[in-house]
Amino acid sequence: MDFKGICEKVTDIARETGSFIRSERQSFSSDKIETKGIHNYVSYVDKQAEEMLVNRLAEIVPAAGFIAEEGTGSKNENGFNWIVDPLDGTTNFIHGLPPHSVSIALADNNRIVLGVVYEVNLSECFYSWEGAPAFLNGKEIRVSDTARVKDSLIATGFPYTAFDRMSSFLVSFEYFMKNSHGLRRLGSAAIDLAYVACGRFDAFYEFGLSPWDVAAGSFLVQQAGGRVSDFSGGGDYLFGRELVAANGKVFDEFGGAVRRIMT
């Protein structure tokens, strides 16, 4: 399969969807927000953006199923699946705050072979496909070469449903506050991972994640020379709801600290 050619089409689709999201934000109001659960919001923009993505992506790989945040389409138990988040960072979006993004990955039996993350506000498109490096708007990107946690800038996300792990998360938060250049919480896991891929962040960790939050971004990190795992150091990060990502030099130290505190 021509993953490069497919990726070129997917980046165009991501940009078009991002343009729709950006234009809708100009007239968006709070009465258009729906609540799916505690701290979990959705709007017609999420739903229409996902419909746009599903319709367009289905034309590229007709046999592929869908794993999408708003539930459009159906998953293939075997073969190809698009893993789609039409608007990662919905809470940011409804408050008019960057970043928020479109995240699209193509999986072949849970092995990601293509990933695209488009940040709407800055029009930054991060992308890669199997066998290729990672790119940002046509320029190759790499993870940072920071070698120690104490010299790292770390990204994380605050849990909004899995409060049973809050105490250990707060311990990790205090540890990294004291032993790194600091922590940042942007509100879009897809962007956190894309920023690790391009070296803006040195490392990222979060729990309570869904596959559409991390599929494209985790692939970008690996294609850019970084490493990804679950909190225990294993490979169950796509559906396991927890993820550690970092450049290759700091990964063992950083992942070890997360594992020691969070597990």
Image (cartoon, rainbow, N blue to C red):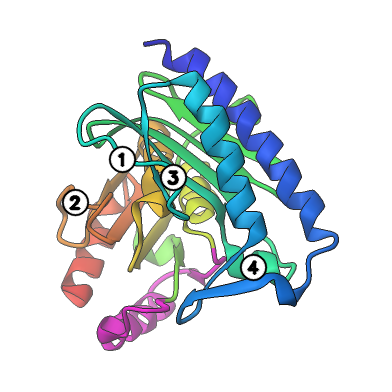
Q: Which residues are magenta?
A: 159-187
- How far apart in space, not on screen, are marks 4 and 2 (Cα)? 28 Å
Q: Residues within 10 Å of mark 3 (few under 14, many from 20)?
A: many
| Residue behind mark 1 | 75
Decide which of tag 4 and tag 2 comes sooner along the chain: 4
Q: Which mark is residue 217?
A: 3
| Whether residue 150 is situated above or below residue 147 in the rendered picture | below
| Residue behind mark 2 | 236
The answer to whether residue 116 is magenta is no
- How far apart in space, not on screen, are marks 3 and 1 (Cα)? 20 Å
Q: Residues within 10 Å of mark 1 (few under 14, many from 20)?
A: some
Residue extending farthest to the bottom is 167
In front: label 1 or label 2: 1
- How far apart in space, not on screen, are marks 1 and 2 (Cα)? 19 Å
In front: label 4 or label 1: 1
Decide which of tag 3 and tag 2 comes sooner along the chain: 3
The image quadrant that residue 178 belongs to is bottom left
| Residue behind mark 4 | 92
Three-letter amino acid code of the residue under disc 2: Asp
In this rendered view, identify the residue nearer to me: 11 or 67: 67
